[in-house]
Amino acid sequence: MVTGVQLNKIGRMWVGILISLLQGNRPYPKYATGKLQRSLQFKHYRNEDGNIVIQLLSAKSDNGYEYLKVVDGGRKPGKYAPINALKKWARIKGMDEGAAYAINKKIFKEGIKATFVINKSIEQLFSTQNDELFRGIEEEIVSDLIDKFSLTFKKV
């Protein structure tokens, strides 16, 4: 059986990879206040089908959006960003608050490019450099699946 210790190790590694990708995003690192990175957490549980789930959690923005999803998926043109959030961002970046209006106009025209950091982090997590971490877990998952199959088989 996969242990909580193993799942915690995977969860911490996933969050670490994600933070690294956000800070290293080029040409624009996704780091102003650090609030998003500090808010990243995970939880693991078994769902109603008995499958193990590791869920990534992040803080919501002031207007209720899960900010990581916005950073990951970008923003389509034709919609303005919340101006107060942009003003705050401009101040943090050392710009005049008035720059937020010009930035918002550009966002409306062009949108914000998606980073796809969630998929990239999953790819890195399951890359060959982490094979050792998953080797033991894979064996346990296969064993768990065989046990479930046997139980299902016996019930039929």
Image (tube, rainbow, N blue to C red):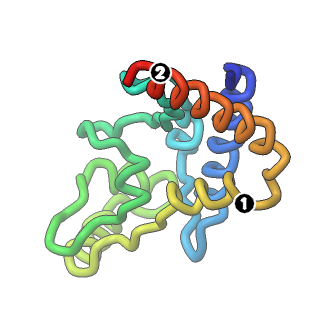
Nearest the camera: 60 or 56?
56
- Reading the image, the residue beneath label 2 is 154
Residue 9 can be seen, yes or no: yes
Q: Judge from the rendering whether residue 78 lies leftward or rightward of residue 135; answer left or right.
A: left
The residue at the point 79 percent across, 51 percent down is 130
Where residue 51 sits: x, y (%)?
Answer: 48, 30
User: Residue furthest toward the bottom?
Assistant: 110
Callout 1 crowding tier (Cα within 10 Å): few <14, some 14–19, many ≥20:
few
Q: Judge from the rendering whether residue 97 lies leftward or rightward of residue 26; answer left or right.
A: left
The residue at the point 68 percent across, 22 percent down is 1
- Mark 2 or 1: in front is 2
Q: Quadrant of residue 139?
A: top right
Nearest the camera: 138 or 38?
138
Nearest the camera: 42 or 141?
141
The residue at the point 85 percent across, 46 percent down is 132
Which one is earlier in the sequence, the residue at label 2 or at label 1? Answer: 1
Callout 2 crowding tier (Cα within 10 Å): few <14, some 14–19, many ≥20:
few
On screen, 154 above or below 20?
A: above
On screen, 152 above or below 92?
A: above
- Reading the image, the residue beneath label 1 is 127
Spatial CA span between label 2 and label 1: 37 Å
Nearest the camera: 3 or 25?
3
In what quadrant of the picture does the C terminus appear? top left
The residue at the point 68 percent across, 27 percent down is 8
**Kind of residue at badge 1:** Ser
Where residue 67 sits: x, y (%)?
Answer: 38, 46
Could you say whether the residue bearing mark 2 is in a helix, strand or loop? helix
**Kind of residue at badge 2:** Lys
Where residue 44 sits: x, y (%)?
Answer: 54, 26
Q: Judge from the rendering whether residue 91 lies leftward or rightward of residue 108; answer left or right.
A: right
User: Residue furthest toward the left?
Assistant: 78
Where residue 114 sits: x, y (%)?
Answer: 41, 68
